[in-house]
RNA sequence: GCCUGGGUGUCGAAAUGGUAGACGAGCUAGAUUUAGGAUCUAGUGUCCGUAAGGACGUGGAGGUUCGAGUCCUCUCCCAGGCACCA
């Protein structure tokens, strides 16, 4: 073959690899495994674009690299196939979501195969397959069994367009994460998984992870631990508990404020304030969270209940108010108001004539920082941090307070009023009490006699077959739960199912989990920084806590890498915007290898960037040059080329650890340019080089490897070692007044004086130094000499 | 407001405190061709200069240092996240 023909080469090796089953792993027999995982895709009808490719190419790069390191690499692929888009498409086209999903998966598989990644397709999974969702249901039942799945009546986020409730995590600045519709509130009965029981360990576990700092920070903020104290205030009939992080400002409390929905509001409201309170409570119920925020940003509204509480230390009577800037579901739904040292309290106090007492030294009001206490009786003069502890202790001694921790994290709402998900495996008896489905009835299959029009309740509720099925299995008057599980439940455990995708007897095999987890490398987008990653960590910790998994490390993903997003002209690629760059024509024209290389060369892997449609030429030219090298093998330049290779290898080995593949390819380009301009190319160097390029360019390197006379696949060889050339020391950089003049070959062991003497005789230096006095010199041994003539 | 990241040519970017802009795109000139989103060769930060060479340049202002894109202080701008969380 004379010139680089990517079509022929790729076609040939695709077939060979498939025939040899090179990418299939016998999971039980492996002793040095490497689990390389991509966040599995949702098979949308839009297909893959060049942005999706980038993550898949990156993971495949490391999968192949680890194989060359001698690891047995497991690199699976599957589909997160339940979800709204397929259902919405089905409604629109009067079809069935399964048809859309299955069709999209077919398209995805062929597009994924174009990448040439070493996926073990024999272990592919599909979360909408009964064989998978049977075990998602099983998982839910395990939570139920341990009291961690619970049905609760509560005010929840509701998307009026998608006609379903949403988890807190799926509300993005007041809007539905999926459709962008403004989210409203609705009081309904919903299923929750008690993730808050795990808040502290989910927080602490972050410290052990090799994850990008920003993702860890996002999760920390989301969990939102705050340390403070509960304090009890007595009223006439009842006592109120508040949560505060500023016990040091206790003497500045001039009111207690409750959330309008607080259960004690009715008890505390006196007759003469009843109308005003009732009105206010009704008004705030109608507002969405966003409206509540917006309105109260201007003036903080609220009303007096008519009741007073006793301040335990000052013995003053302080008024109890309700205001919607206090949230029911944080802390105790009640706060002690310290207007002098809290901005919100300050605003409220000012507009409602509540006294403001300064208790921390400072100039402005409100002053929210820490400092020395004043107006605080025996605590005067103490610093905030000391006072906090002392006041809390003193209150505790009198049974009026204690140290406490609060979290921003809420329980995970998992029920959805939509069809295309795993049915929640619960059956209600005629009295309405929920019971788990018997295990022998799993999977609880989705009914098929359903029209998908959403209507505020699950469309499944309208299935006659589902009603009949429940009664046949459980008796007259028994009914299945008709909500389905959030798709994040499906994806919270898929990495376990990959290890035994066809096991009919259990969700996963603990022995294999022990062998293969934690996952060595997990690659996906930043968009899953909170939801998917937090839920997965929770589920995995649950499985360990209750003995389903026996691994010591309670974290599923030890190493995480976030791939940056690829956009076009600043916009996210999407079919609806019509700005999707498809990889298919690029693969056809330039080849899989060129596109793979270009995806890696675009810039640092974690950076989001704009797609430059022309840059791929550079990688294509590189491959043409590389291909040409095999045609001029000779030995004339052996030594210098080995030296160049050794330098290259040292550099890329270091870069690889930091995922700096753009510069790895730059180094490769430099070396190939050097070899390209030489008369002949060292065969040894070429063989070494080709192996180092195999992770990025599997097809062309496999071809070159064969051309170099090898019978086995290049992926059965090992990452090269250096030739051990004594890397000739770079000379000493000599500067005059910090300006580089020349690089001089110089024995490292000679003294600074000797070097200076030598340099002064060289014409380049003697000319420049003629009219100058040398004030002093700075010498860094073997590296640099700076001759200073200026004062 | 708070928490993360970032500000370097026309663009993507590179630089263990030691010649800023490697590598690539684009552009310019030339070559080549079965006219392509092809390939090959050379040049390409700004200003002064025919040239040799010099000056200036990493958002801004200071500082540390023989030496700062890199370290420190302040400040401006951009992106992302959280946001009445007590």
Image (tube, rainbow, N blue to C red):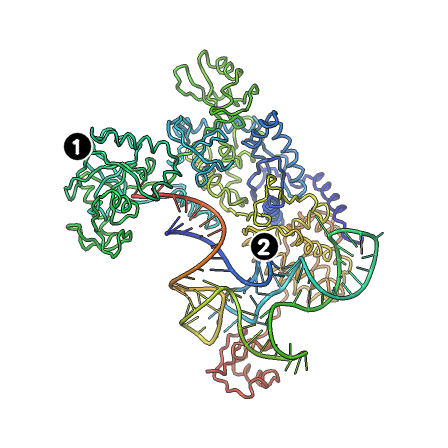
Q: Which residue is mark 1?
A: A236
Q: Secondary structure at mark 1?
A: loop
Residue A754 % position (x, y)? 54, 83
Q: Residue furthest bottom?
A: A771
Q: Is residue A26 left or right of residue B38?
A: left
Instruction: Return the residue nearer the eye: A211 or A718.
Output: A211
**Residue beneath disc 2:** A603
- Label 2 vs label 1, nearer the camera: 1
Q: Crowdedness of circle 2 by 10 Å Cα count: few (<14), some, many (20+)?
A: some
Residue A719, horizontal then vertical, whole percent: 63, 53
Q: Is residue A330 above or below residue A721?
A: above
Residue A505 image label: none
Residue A268 visible in rendering: no
Q: Residues within 10 Å of mark 1 (few under 14, many from 20)?
A: few
Up-down relation of residue A580 to residue A287 (above or below): below
Element at label 2: loop
Q: Are marks 2 and 1 on the same chain?
A: yes
The residues tagged by marks 2 and 1 sit, at their Cα atoms, a distance apart of: 67 Å
């Amino acid at each position: 073959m004379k010139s680089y023909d990517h079509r022929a080469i790729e076609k040939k090796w695709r077939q060979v690899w498939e025939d040899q089953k090179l990418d299939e792993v016998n999971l039980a027999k492996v002793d040095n495994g490497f689990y390389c995982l991509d966040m599995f895709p949702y098979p949308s009808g839009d297909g893959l674009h060049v942005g999706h490719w980038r993550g898949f190419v990156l993971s495949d790069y490391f999968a192949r690299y680890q194989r060359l390191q001698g690891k047995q690499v497991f690199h699976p692929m599957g589909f997160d196939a339940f979800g709204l888009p397929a259902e919405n498409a089905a409604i629109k086209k009067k079809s069935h979501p399964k048809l859309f999903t299955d069709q999209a998966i077919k398209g995805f598989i062929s597009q994924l195969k174009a990448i040439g990644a070493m996926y073990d397709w024999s272990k592919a999974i599909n979360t909408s397959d009964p064989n998978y969702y049977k075990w998602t249901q099983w998982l839910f039942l395990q939570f139920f069994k341990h009291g961690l799945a619970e049905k609760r009546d509560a005010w929840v986020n509701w998307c009026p367009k998608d006609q379903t409730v949403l988890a807190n995590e799926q509300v993005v600045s007041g809007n539905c994460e999926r459709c962008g519709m403004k989210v409203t509130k609705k009081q309904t009965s919903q299923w929750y998984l008690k993730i808050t029981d795990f808040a502290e360990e989910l927080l602490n576990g972050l410290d052990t992870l090799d994850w990008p700092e920003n993702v860890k920070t996002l999760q920390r903020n989301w969990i939102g631990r705050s340390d403070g104290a509960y304090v009890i205030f007595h009223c006439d009939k009842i006592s109120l508990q508040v949560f505060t992080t500023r016990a040091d400002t206790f003497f500045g409390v001039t009111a207690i404020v409750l959330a309008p929905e607080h259960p004690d509001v009715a008890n505390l409201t006196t007759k003469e304030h009843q109308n005003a309170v009732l009105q206010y409570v009704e008004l705030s119920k109608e507002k969405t969270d966003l409206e509540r925020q917006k309105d109260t940003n201007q003036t903080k509204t609220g009303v007096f209940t008519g009741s007073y509480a006793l301040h335990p230390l000052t013995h003053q009577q302080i008024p109890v108010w309700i205001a919607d800037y206090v949230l029911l579901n944080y802390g105790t739904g009640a706060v002690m108001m310290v207007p002098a040292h809290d901005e919100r309290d300050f605003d409220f106090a000012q507009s409602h004539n509540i006294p403001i007492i300064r208790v921390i030294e400072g100039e402005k009001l409100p002053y929210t920082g820490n400092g020395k206490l004043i107006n605080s009786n025996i605590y005067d003069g103490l610093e905030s941090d000391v006072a906090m502890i002392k006041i809390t202790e003193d209150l505790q001694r009198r049974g009026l307070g204690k140290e406490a921790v609060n979290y921003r994290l809420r329980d995970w709402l998992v029920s959805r009023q939509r069809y295309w998900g795993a049915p929640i495996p619960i059956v209600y008896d005629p009295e309405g009490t929920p019971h788990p489905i018997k295990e022998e009835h799993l999977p609880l299959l989705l009914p098929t006699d359903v029209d998908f029009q959403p209507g505020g309740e699950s469309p499944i509720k309208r299935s006659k077959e589902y009603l009949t099925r429940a009664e046949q299995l459980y008796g007259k008057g028994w009914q299945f739960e008709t909500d389905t599980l959030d798709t994040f439940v499906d994806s919270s455990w898929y990495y376990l199912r990959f290890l035994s995708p066809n096991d009919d007897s259990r969700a996963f095999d603990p022995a294999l989990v022990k062998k293969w987890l934690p996952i060595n490398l997990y690659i996906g987008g930043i968009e899953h920084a909170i939801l998917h990653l937090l839920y997965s960590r929770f589920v995995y910790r649950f499985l360990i806590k209750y003995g389903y998994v026996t691994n010591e490390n309670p974290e599923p993903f030890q190493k995480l890498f976030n791939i940056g997003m690829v956009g076009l002209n600043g916009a996210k690629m999407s079919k609806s915007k019509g700005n999707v760059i498809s990889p298919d024509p690029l693969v056809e024209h330039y080849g899989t290898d060129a596109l793979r290389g270009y995806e890696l060369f675009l810039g640092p892997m974690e950076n989001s960037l704009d797609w430059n449609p022309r840059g791929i030429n550079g990688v294509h030219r590189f491959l043409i040059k590389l291909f040409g090298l095999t045609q001029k093998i000779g030995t004339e330049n052996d030594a210098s080329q080995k030296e160049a290779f050794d330098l290259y290898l040292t550099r890329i080995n270091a870069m690889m650890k930091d995922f700096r593949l753009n510069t790895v390819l730059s180094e490769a380009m430099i070396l190939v340019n050097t070899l390209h301009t030489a008369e002949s190319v060292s065969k040894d160097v070429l063989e070494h080089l080709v192996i180092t390029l195999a992770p990025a360019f599997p097809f062309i390197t496999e071809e070159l490897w064969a051309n170099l006379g090898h019978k086995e696949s290049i992926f059965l060889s090992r990452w090269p070692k250096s030739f051990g050339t004594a890397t000739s020391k770079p000379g000493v950089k000599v500067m005059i007044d910090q300006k580089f003049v020349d690089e001089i070959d110089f024995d490292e062991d000679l003294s600074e004086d000797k070097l200076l003497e030598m340099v002064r005789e060289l014409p380049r230096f003697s000319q420049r130094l003629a009219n100058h006095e040398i004030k002093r010199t700075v010498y860094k041994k073997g590296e640099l000499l700076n001759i200073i003539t200026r004062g």
